[in-house]
Image (cartoon, rainbow, N blue to C red):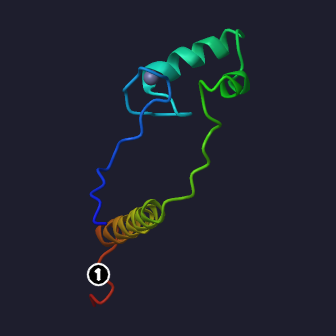
Amino acid sequence: MNEVRHCERPKCLVEGCDEPKKCRGLCAACYSIARLRVNSGLVTWSDLVSMGLALEVEERPRNPFASALEEKLESKKQMNGAMDDVVADAMQQPAPDAP
Ligand SMILES: [Zn+2]
């Protein structure tokens, strides 16, 4: 009942290859070889998919953490930009309340 499941890293789909998968179900090494073959015109990705040697490109849903972080970084960047402007203004102009 209380089955302990180890978090398995998804592996390359090529039989006998134990590398973690990177792209299209293939590890970095297998993917780069596959891509070379595809680029050389020997096969297409859909051929490889139908042969079971690659997967369709996975469309990943946008990760909420990634979106949130990007948003924060973006607003931080904007804030820093605004601060820089304020500092630049303060350095260029004399204090307005000076008589
Ligand atoms: Zn592999």
Question: Considering only vertical position in the picture, is 33 above or below 56?
Answer: above
> As rendered, which of 29 and 89 lies closer to the eye?
29
**Residue assigned mark 1:** 95
Residue 16 placed where, x, y %?
Answer: 42, 20
Left or right side of 12 for 36: right
Residue type, label 1:
Ala
The residue shown at (49%, 23%) is 14
Report ligand 1 position as a quadrant.
top left
> As rendered, which of 90 and 19 lies closer to the eye?
19
The residue shown at (46%, 34%) is 22
Question: Considering only vertical position in the picture, is 76 above or below 7?
Answer: below
Left or right side of 37 for 91: left
> As rendered, which of 3 and 85 lies closer to the eye?
3
Residue 43 placed where, x, y %?
Answer: 70, 14
The quadrant holding residue 47 is top right
Left or right side of 76 for 31: right
The quadrant holding residue 20 is top left
